[in-house]
Structures are given as C-alpha cells and as structure tokens.
Image (cartoon, rainbow, N blue to C red):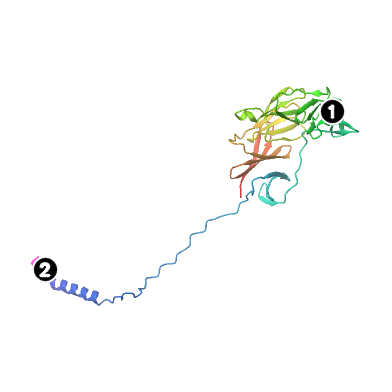
Amino acid sequence: MTILASRWFPWASIVALTAIVVVLAWPRARPGTPVALPALPPVRPPPAMPTRAVPCVPGNAPILRVLDGDPVVCSDGTCLRFGADATTLVATPPEVLGPPLRAIVREVDGRWSACRDTTCRPLGPHLAAALARDPDADRAATFDLATVVAGRVAWSVAADRVVPVRGREKAITVVGNLLLVRRFESCTDRSCLQSQLVDGTGRELGEVEAGGDVIALDDHRIVAISEFSALQVRDLARGTLLVAFDPDARVADFIAAARIDADHVALLRDAYDGVRVSVIEVLDRQLVIDAERFVPGC
C-alpha cells in the first residue's frame, strides 16, 4: 500500500492543483451584472374545453302551448318548440282550445237557457231568479243540459231546485255530465288535494286529484291532473277511472298542461333549476311518456 501511494501521489497532486487553477481562473460576474439564463421552452396553452350552446327558459312564469303537435314553452317573450329532432325558437303560437268541458248558459228569446251547440233547454223560474240575483257569477251546464252550476251552487234543471252537494266551503266545476267538487276544509296531508266527482243528483262517484288542471281529450274522456302531476283518465259520462299515472313527485311541481290530440297530452313541470317538458301518450291500459326533456333556467 505504501509503494502504491508513493507512485500515485505526484499525479494526484498535479490534478488537484490544476483544478484549483481552473476555478480561480474562471471569469466571475461582477455584482449587479445581469446573468443570462437559458431560454425556457414555450408554454403551450391547455386544450380548449369542448362546449355547446343549449336552450334555456328565461323568467319565472313559463306558459305551455302546442304548435303542430309539438309542445312550446314561452317565457318573457321567448318561445322554444320541442320537436322530435331539434329544439327551435319560434314566435308565440296562439292558444288552441281543445274540446269543451261544459255547455253554456245564456239568454234565448229573453229566457235563461242551458245550451249545447244548437240545442237549448229553458231554465225554471227559481233558477232563473238565482241567475238574475247574481249576474256576475260563473255559470255552466252539463253536456246533457240536466244540471246548471251558478257560482258555488248546483241546480237540477228538471226539478228547478238546488242539488245537495256535501261541504260548506267548496268550489263546483262542470266536467262533461258530472260535477267536480273541491272542498276547502281543514286537513293536514295530501288529502287536502282530493276533489270529488258528483253526478247530477249529488251522489258521490269517487275521489280525484284535479287541483292542477282538467283537460278534455275528446267528447268521452278527460284527464285530471294534480298539483303533484299525477294523471287520471276518466270517462266523461260516468266518471269511471280508465287509467292513471303517478310520477311520485315529492313536491307540487305542476305548472301547466295542454292537449296535443285525442291521445297525447303535454305536461310542463317545475324542476328546481329549470323545467321538465313531457309528452304523454294515453293508451287503453296505461299512460306512457313518449318524450321528455329538461330545460335549464336562464
């Protein structure tokens, strides 16, 4: 080991001295002198996030219309048509009325009468006097011209007397040959939304939730819609339940409904941060959602 160290010592010393000389001889930057830094590679921008424009419904009070079989939602002057292939902007379509739900009460040759189309039935003196006492009351007649509703009172045309309908505080609406009675009484649950179908004698035929709307599909069927968008299709003459559909909504989400044709109904519901538009087909034994779209608010 001693011999090897003595042989390599001169070479190690020479290498060390050379390194010291190189370091001392290396040019140093004076204080304050800018030092050139190596150029950095160019920074590439991140790739663009793919986006696309989507339709939205402005405002807080949308309305529902139908245009050539497609539902149209309008709000604040903007109308969106929901077609089978695309959603497009359209002008506000006119409101198209479906089949009537009731006959009318009017004067014919100076006498109060219940009329449907060209057929009229004169009213008795007691009912006529009640109409004269309250000329501003809403009035309507059943399709068969057997019952007249004036304000919140139902009358039998043949007997010329009041039909006994249960409930002190109530609203009565004519639906075909039936009466839809909604009572305003104390309650604590969803039973508050129940209405009663009643015939011309005051006999109760069954409960129905119809606080949203009632629409005639044709001369024989109606759709009753609740505040929770539950739908029931019933026979206009007897009130028989034909088919029902309940979306099991947890809140009252109904906004509007409109008849498309005898077998389709458009339904507009609140969806918290937008609206939901549905087209529902009425089949013999079930109701089927043909199409449904969510539209955000804007």
Which residue type carries mark 1?
Answer: Ala
- Disc 2 or disc 1, which is closer to the eye? 1
Q: Where residue 267 appears, x then y in whole percent?
A: 67, 40
Instruction: Name the residue beneath numbered marker 1.
Output: 129
Instruction: Name the residue beneath numbered marker 2.
Output: 5
Q: Is residue 7 magenta?
A: yes
Q: Residues within 10 Å of mark 2 (few under 14, many from 20)?
A: few
Decide: is 76 above or below 130: below
Residue 21 numbered mark, or none: none
Nearest the eye: 201 or 187? 187
Q: Where residue 227 appears, x then y in whole percent?
A: 64, 35
Q: In this view, does 286 lie to the left or right of 102?
A: left
Residue 103: image quadrant is top right
Image quarter in which the N terminus is found:
bottom left
Q: Residue at x 11, y 71 (%)?
A: 7
The secondary element bearing badge 2 is classed as helix
Question: Residue 161: in sight, yes or no?
Answer: yes
The secondary element bearing badge 1 is classed as helix
Nearest the eye: 125 or 197? 125
Q: In this view, does 63 lie to the left or right of 34?
A: right
Magenta stretch bounds: 1-8
Which residue type carries mark 2?
Answer: Ala
What secondary structure do most residues of the magenta stretch adopt? Answer: helix
Total number of numbered discs in the rendering: 2
Q: Which residue is drawn at 74% across and 28% down?
A: 179
Q: Distance between the residues labelled 2 and 1?
A: 138 Å
